[in-house]
Amino acid sequence: MEEAKALRWIPYAGLAISLTLALIVGPRTPVHYAVVVGGSAAVALWLPRGMAMLEDPDPPVLRATVYYVVLLALMGTLILTSPLFGFFGFTGYLHAMVLPGRTKLAGIAGTAAAMATTQMGGIAYIHGAGVYLYLVLFAVNLMIAGALTVRGAAEQEHRRELAEANERLREMLEENAGLHAQLVAQAREAGVLDERQRLAGEIHDTIAQGLTGIVRQLEVAERFEDDTDKRRHHLGLARELARESLAEARRSVQALRPGPLTVAQLPEALAELTASWSRTAGIPARVEISGDAVALPPEAEVVLFRAAQEALANAGKYSGAGRVGVTLSYTTDVVVLDVVDDGRGFEPGGEPSENGTGYGLTAMRSRLKQVGGTLTIESEPGDGTAISAAVPVVPVGAGVPVAPPEPTAPTEAAVLPELPGAVPTAR
């Protein structure tokens, strides 16, 4: 910035010094005064054009050439009138930078010729042997000024490239800021969508299934209006389901784990879930644990628990099963949950749906995918259904074996006889 200011005012300072000395030294003639004063005024009015072009990294070629030719003509006229205008003559070197490409050298040569004239004391001394001295001075001025000008041009080009690079960087930063804002907005929208999906899944797994069980128990209770004990029993089951559903709904809103998993490990939670489902659905169910259980990440345990919950709910609503088997198999690589029933089954691709939406199985697949798991469904009409959910083993503890759950009393969940082909294990 300071350098730019100096380059702007130095030509005017040189012009003022030259004009002052020319007026003092003379000759004191009207023509001399008119030429030096008028020429100086013309130069002072012409210089701002060059100042503007010096700040332009790519000035128009024709305009720059015309400017410099006029400047060189005015400067030559003043020097021919008085060699003392050599103090201003070096301005030609500075303003040669506005010229394009190699034409800078032509401008420098013209200025060097004018400066050599001032160093000779005027054009009157350039004759005879003085011509050789003039040529030597011209060559010296040309070499020195040429070298300095070339170096200045290189620095100017470097500054121009830096300015362009800074401008590109600024544009990139602005673009990146815009992209960052877009990514933040998209991430926010994705977060909102994920939360909606989570709440939809939690509502389906808790409130919807709980209400379904409550309605079923109330419908059964209506059929026993004359049997007070059975009616009271089913009303009690409906009341218990309502309390459990309310608790699960509160936990879901708070994004907590399913109730059974907050107080027990996955095998015990599955045993409790299966016993509760068997008691309310009236279908015998059996739970088996295969392999040494290890603690899994909470999200993986939640996914397997919800898969079991959905599979049992489907078995109770659609299959017409007489018995159900739940197997949790631990291997070194994966943990597999199998839910098998001996119900009516269905054609592959015609999976049971709730109100025709099939949301439960879709949500199950989505949850498993989020933790790197898979869902496999095998079924044939009249030959039951097998649902298998597998998640990779990523232990969060030391892998301490977890004891299988204690056998459930017959009043909680009837013991399931061996199913044909046995309960599937890891595939």
Image (cartoon, rainbow, N blue to C red):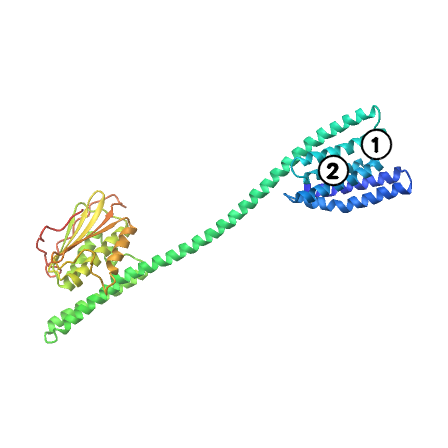
Which three-letter amino acid code belongs to the residue tagged 2?
Gly
Q: Are marks 2 and 1 in contact (CB under 8 Å)?
A: no
Compare residues 145 and 106 and report the one nearer the observer.
Answer: 106
Which three-letter amino acid code belongs to the residue tagged 1?
Ile
| Drawn side of residue 299 relative to residue 276, left or right | right
**In the figure, 41 relative to 411: above or below?**
above
Compare residues 130 and 238 and report the one nearer the observer.
Answer: 130
Compare residues 343 and 59 and report the one nearer the observer.
Answer: 59
Q: Does dot 2 land on a helix, a strand or a loop?
A: helix
- Residue mark closest to the camera, 2 vs 1: 1
| Residue in view at x 83 percent, y 36 percent | 80
Q: Quadrant of residue 104?
A: top right
Quadrant the N terminus occupies:
top right
* Residue for badge 1: 123
- Give the image location of residue 282, x and y in percent: 13, 63
**In the figure, 96 relative to 171: above or below?**
above
Q: How many marks?
A: 2
Q: Quote the CA–CA distance across marks 2 and 1.
A: 19 Å
- Give the image location of residue 292, x and y in percent: 18, 45
Instruction: Residue 302: tell me if it is visible.
Output: no
Compare residues 212 and 154 and report the one nearer the observer.
Answer: 154
Q: Quadrant of residue 135?
A: top right
Instruction: Residue 223: tell me if it is visible.
Output: yes
Q: Identify the residue at the far top of this view.
A: 129
- Give the image location of residue 191, x and y in percent: 37, 56
* Residue for badge 2: 92
- Give the image location of residue 360, x and y in percent: 24, 59
